[in-house]
Amino acid sequence: ETGVTQTPRHLVMGMTNKKSLKCEQHLGHNAMYWYKQSAKKPLELMFVYNFKEQTENNSVPSRFSPECPNSSHLFLHLHTLQPEDSALYLCASSQPGQDYEQYFGPGTRLTVT
Amino acid sequence: QKEVEQDPGPLSVPEGAIVSLNCTYSNSAFQYFMWYRQYSRKGPELLMYTYSSGNKEDGRFTAQVDKSSKYISLFIRDSQPSDSATYLCAILNTGGFKTIFGAGTRLFVKA
């Protein structure tokens, strides 16, 4: 595997379910990001981790819970989501301090029913 | 006022045309200016970034920054059908870690 991978690629979940999104990067980076991409809207930064430490939480509701066990892996735990949370969730990585050069995964298309 | 404004298009051009994609931004503190390309069902891919003002060229692509006007542009020469994608501009301030993205311009290049 090369670059940034994300699983699953598609996810349908009910409002009462709990699920997790997984991201893995094979680039040797130490910064990882979660973004939300909704139709016709700009990418919204959700969380940033540098060397496994969370350095940014962009006022994200607590129903989204990130986890970064090491510099290569990033998770987004989901629970009690709302239909408006349906979107493409993108993971990215970079070297710390080089946020201008981010590498993105293919995303997880999430549908909340 | 949004921090970054980008016309969503769609923009449709014939093959071989010169394409001009543009964004405006509001805060003069931004120093890094990036262009990403996103194909359908894929994540964004960095095309190039520019620090401060000036031009940067990479093959058929040229990025241009005019800080006095707070205006950034991406030019694509000899456009190809494979250039059909959504192009996202993005900005970042020095020392910051929050990249601000435009909404993206959808480009169609017709064969």
Image (cartoon, coloured by chain):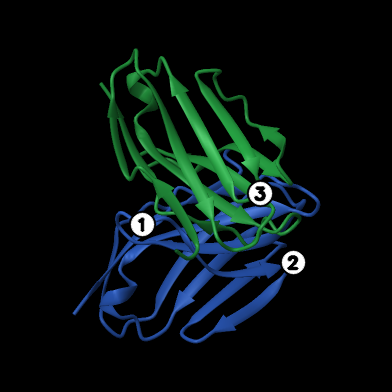
Chain colours: A green, B blue
Q: Amino acid at mark 1?
A: Lys
What is the secondary structure assignment of the residue under circle 2? loop
Whole-angstrom CA distance, mark 2 to mark 1, is 29 Å
- SS under mark 1: loop
Q: Chain of mark 3?
A: A
The amino acid pointed to by label 2 is Ser
Q: CA distance from mark 3 to mark 2?
A: 30 Å
Task: In the rendered view, tell whether residue B19 sits above or below residue B96.
Answer: below
Q: Is residue B97 left or right of residue B34?
A: right
Indicate the chain on which mark 2 is placed.
B
Image quarter hosting the N terminus of chain A: bottom left
Residue B29 is left or right of residue B11, and the answer is right
Q: Nearer the viewer, residue B40 or A5?
A: A5
Asked if labels 3 and 2 share a chain, the reply is: no
Residue on which disc 2 sits: B52
Q: Residue furthest left?
A: B111
Say which residue label 1 marks: B42
Residue drawn at the location 70% of the way across and 41% of the way down: A52
Comparing labels 3 and 2, the label whose residue is closer to the camera: 3
Position of residue A53 relative to residue B42, above or below, is: above
Crowd band around label 1 with a 10 angstrom C-alpha radius: few (<14), some (14–19), many (20+):
some
Q: Nearer the viewer, mark 1 or mark 3?
A: 3
Whether labels 1 and 3 share one chain: no
Among the 4 quarters of the image, the one containing residue A53: top right
Residue at the far right in the pictured view: B95
Cα–Cα span, label 1 and label 3: 23 Å
Q: Earlier in the sequence, mark 2 or mark 1?
A: 1
Q: Quadrant of residue B80?
A: bottom left
Counting from the top left corner in percent of width and height, residue B51 is at: 72, 68
- Residue occupying image coordinates x 54% and y 51%: A92
Q: Which residue is mark 3?
A: A71
- The spot of residue B73 in percent (x, y) is 54, 68
